Image: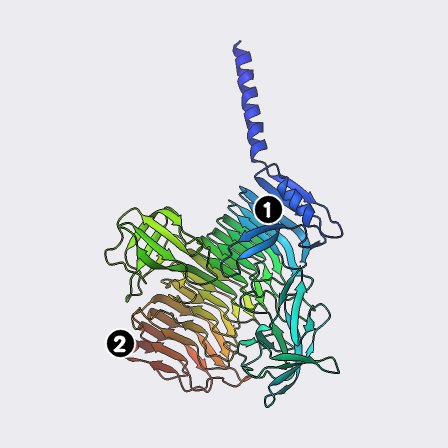
Amino acid sequence: MKKLSINLSASILFLVSMLTFSVSATEIINIKYADGDMTSIVRNAIGNAKSKDIKLVFEKGIYNFKPEYAIGKFLYITNHGNGFKKIIFNFTGFDSVAVDGQGSEFIFNGALMPFIFEACNKVSIENITIDWDIPFVFQGDVVDVNPAEHYIDLKPYTKGFSWELIDGKIIFPNIDGFKFTKLGSTLPHNKKTKAIAYGALDMDLDPDYVEKLSNGNLRIHQKSMPYFPAIGTVLNSKGDRENDRYAPAFLTRNSKNVHFENVVVHHALGMAFLFERTENIKILNSGVYIREGSDRVISATADATHFANCKGDVLIENCRIEGMYDDGTNVHGTYVQVIDVLDAKTVRVALKHFEQMGFQFAGPGDEIWFIKSPNPQRAEEGIVKNVQTVNEKYSDLTFTNNLPGNLKSGDILENKTWNPVFTMRGNTIKDHRARNIIIKTPFKILIENNNLSSMMSSIMLRGETFFWFESGNVEDVIIRNNHFTRSAYGGSEHAVLNVSPRLGKSFDQTMTYDRNILFENNIIETFDNRIVWADRLDGLIIRGNTIRQTFTDNPLFPDAFMFDLVNCDNIQIINNTYEGKNTNIIKVDSPSSRNLVIKNNVGFKN
């Protein structure tokens, strides 16, 4: 009996072991290549999964996806247009989900949202290229301009593009019922490099009328033309601001442990990678850029990467980021505004920007900073006990302890819990609209060994208590060993490093906001004067940088200063080297001069 008991116990242990293995094993779903629309195949593969741990493995090929049989959902998507979206890969509530394209290309047609990951504990995406057969833009070569008669002549692109001229208006792309009836956001591009043209400014084009000339060119008439682009440039339009961000290529939210590797986005109908309230993110050896050999001048129609109220560690490493129509990366929290104090522990707050509607600002257990005007600095803290959603704009937050006694309407709240540690290393970011990097997190930021070239400021640190309402002020930043080339070549005034909070009228505009930045051992080769432009910054070390003036372009702002400091404190400019003709080196106001240290620099007077 004793021997039987031992054998029985061993058998039970074996069965338990096998059961554990079965429960924890990942369900592998192999997708075989097929011609035609793959939407239903993918939808059924995900919908019929038997496990909460799945992996889709695609046989290498070029797969096509169309909207007709896509999943439809109403979605609130931060920094995009809210509404009913057609989704191809819909992953919700998985313990782990992986997709391996094995080098496949996914080609989308029409108004589609390729991927959403929601409430997933682990996400891994690799070896995939994303593109659209027809981009959601209009594009033409500038062949003539006439400022006196207020028109631009364009030779429109037709192959690979979709548009019609109807009743004097350019309608595009007119696919799957989706169309723009105004050109909207428009910029000229260098035809050879595809970068935004030197000195260009954003235009919002809404032509009075468009006529087709006998040679097939289009004459765009607009009396309120913002400016006239140079002949030979490529003009690109992405539509009106209300509709030009349909959806990101990849939306990940309320998830954690996310890993993208060898994923390339050639086009997106909004951002390429968007993360909301997601923890621990890696984007490695990936890219957002125009397909080689394409005559397009735009990749994603908005940011390449965007992180809204994320936490944990965020890493972007060894990526190629080019051609998008907004920032290379934007990392931020969200300010909400106090509308009313309802009782001793409850406050009603509002989301303020039209593209924040429906965003989840906080959840139970989150730590919140109270920021009370006129002081823009973080003050008391509270822990959320309960969130009662009123509608897409308003929420009632109840805290475990009493609210600060002097909290009032118009003050703002910031979520302390949902902020990341951010690292950006070994990337190339260039030839796109806006800034290379814009960051707002109080935790450690490391930007190193990147190659950066920018239309606007290369690195911008800007919390905003109005308009975008993107929090918050930085407290620990290292920017080192980067190579900056041809910075701030657009028509508006920017800098290589621009620290510039944008605070509402109720806040003191002289108090420091950001702090503790090290700008060290960078190589800067650019044509214009501005290198560091800082406002309301406490603690900046500019050390060991090599700055070389280039002469491929004329300075856009020749009277600007290399280092321009306003309402700053504790600034050091030491051991830097300058090679160039600029004599406007350092400009400081009285507050900035109090604890200013300038020494051991070469090429300009200390």
Identify whether 415 is placed above or below 181: above
Mark 1 or mark 2, which is nearer the start of the sequence? 1
Q: Is residue 512 left or right of residue 528?
A: left
Q: Nearer the viewer, residue 394 or 565?
A: 394
Crowding around mark 2 (Cα neighbors within 10 Å: few <14, some 14 to 19, many 20+) is few
In which quarter of the view is residue 159 placed?
bottom right
Identify whether 238 is placed above or below 61: below
What amino acid is found at the position of numbered circle 1 in the picture? Ala
Q: Position of residue 288 (x, y in %)?
A: 59, 63
Q: Please state, as top left, top right, bottom left or bottom right, where the C terminus lies in the image.
A: bottom left
Farthest residue, direction bottom: 148
Q: Is residue 9 left or right of residue 194?
A: left
Q: Nearer the viewer, residue 150 or 102?
A: 150
What amino acid is found at the position of numbered circle 2 in the picture? Arg
- From the viewer's perspective, is the residue at label 2 or at label 1 nearer? 1
Residue at (40% x, 76% y) in the render: 533
In which quarter of the view is residue 594 placed?
bottom left
Identify whether 436 is placed above or below 554: above
Q: Position of residue 567 (x, y in %)?
A: 31, 75
Q: Position of residue 349 (x, y in %)?
A: 36, 56
Picture disc at residue 594: 2
In which quarter of the view is residue 151 placed?
bottom right
- Give the distance between the C-alpha atoms of the residues marked 2 and 1, in whole angstroms: 55 Å
Q: Describe the colour scheme in one phrase.
A: rainbow
Residue at (35% x, 65% y) in the render: 516
Judged from the image, the secondary structure of the residue bearing numbered disc 2 is loop
Disc 1: which residue: 98
Q: Is residue 8 left or right of residue 59?
A: left
Q: How many marks?
A: 2
Crowding around mark 1 (Cα neighbors within 10 Å: few <14, some 14 to 19, many 20+) is many
Q: Nearer the viewer, residue 139 or 601?
A: 139
